[in-house]
Image (cartoon, helix red, strand yellow):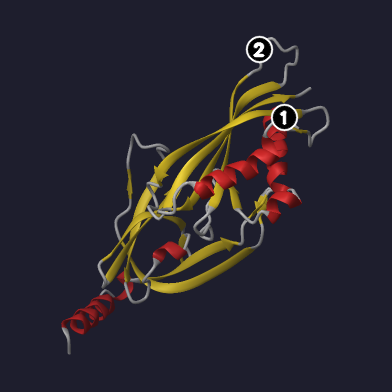
Amino acid sequence: MGKYASLHSDVYSVFAQAGWTAENIKTIPANYSTLNLGNEFIRVNIIPTGHLANVGISHSLSGLLILDIFVSAGNGLNRLSVIADKLDTYLVKKTIATTLGGNTQFSESSLNPIGLDSANSSLYRGNYSINFNYFGN
Amino acid sequence: MGYKNIVVSNVDKAFKMLKDLAVNVTLSSVRDSGFDFSTNAPSTIVTTSKVILAVPMSKKRQPGKDPATALQHSFLFKAKDLPDPTIYDTISVIGGETWKIVQPYDNDGYVVTVNVVRNA
C-alpha cells in the first residue's frame, strides 16, 4: 500500500473504532455527498503538505488533518468545544498504525470558530486541525 | 377556477401540445445511511427511481471550463410532477444518455428547470 493510502487508512481507522461511533456524531470524508447529515456532523479532510525533511525515511509525509465541525447555528460555541474535546481524546499525541511498516503520529490540536456555513446558514462551522507526521517504509 | 389552477391547466396543455418533443425520463437517486470508515464505503445504499415527462432543452459545451469536455444540458418538468429535484441524482433519457443533476434549479411553482452535466 502506498503512503497516501496508508495515511488514509490510519486516519479513517480513528473514525471506524467503536468508541468514536458510540459518540454518535455523524462523520463523513471530504468529497462525499449525502443528504442525511442533520444539524451536526464532521467532515474529515486529510491534507498532506510535504515530505518529512531530515528524517531518513523515504516514504514519509507531514500534513494537517482538518475536521470541519458543523453544529446548529444560534446556540453558542459550547457544542463546538465539546466535540473538539472529544476529538482530542482520539487524536492528540496518538500514534496510529493500520498497515505494516507505517504509522501516523498526531501532535497538538487547535480549534478555529469560522462562522455560519455559506451553503446552509442553519449550520455553524468550526475548524478543528491537528498536525500529523506519517512514517512509512 | 382560480388563477393558479388556470396556469397549471395551461402547463398541462402545453406539455400535451409538445407531443413527442416531451419525453419520458428516469430520475434516480442513491441514498445512504452514513459513511463506514472501516470499509471506506457508504453504510447502506438505497436506490429509488421515477419516470416523469420532461422537455429536453438546449445542450452546450463551454470551452475554457474545466473539464473542457463537460456537456451542459437542462430539462423542463411540470412542477407538480417534480416539486423537489434535489432528492434525485441523475436523469436518464430512455435509450440514451445519463446526466448528473447539478445546482442550481429553478422552480416557479408551475415548471421546474433542472440543470445537468455529463462528460463527453
Q: Residue at x 71, y 42 (%)?
A: A14
Residue B47 vertical placement versus A93 (above, below)? below
Front one among A122 and B14: A122
Residue A72: x percent and y percent? Answer: 46, 55
Front one among B24 and B112: B112
Residue type for callout 2:
Ala
Residue A38 vertical placement versus A13 (above, below)? below
Residue type for callout 1:
Thr
| Neighbourhood count class around disc 2 (C-alpha, 10 Å): few under 14, some 14–19, many 20 upward | few
Residue A104 vertical placement versus B12 (above, below)? above
Q: Chain of mark 2?
A: A
Which label sits on residue B33? none
Residue B43, quarter of the rendered image = bottom right
Q: Residue at x 82, y 27 (%)?
A: A101
The residue most toward the right is: A100
Q: CA distance from mark 2 to mark 1?
A: 16 Å
Q: Residue at x 76, y 29 (%)?
A: A103
Residue A105 lies left or right of residue A111; in this view the side is right
| Circles 2 and 1 on the same subunit | yes
Residue B32 vertical placement versus A30 (above, below)? below
Q: Is residue B39 visible?
A: no
| Neighbourhood count class around disc 1 (C-alpha, 10 Å): few under 14, some 14–19, many 20 upward | many
Q: How many marks?
A: 2
Q: Is residue A66 visible?
A: yes
Residue B40: x percent and y percent? Answer: 68, 48
Residue B42: x percent and y percent? Answer: 64, 55
**Quadrant housing the N terminus of chain A:** top right
Residue A103 lies left or right of residue A8; in this view the side is right
The residue pinned by badge 1 equals A104
Q: Residue at x 69, y 9 (%)?
A: A54
Front one among A50 and B78: A50
The residue pinned by badge 2 equals A53
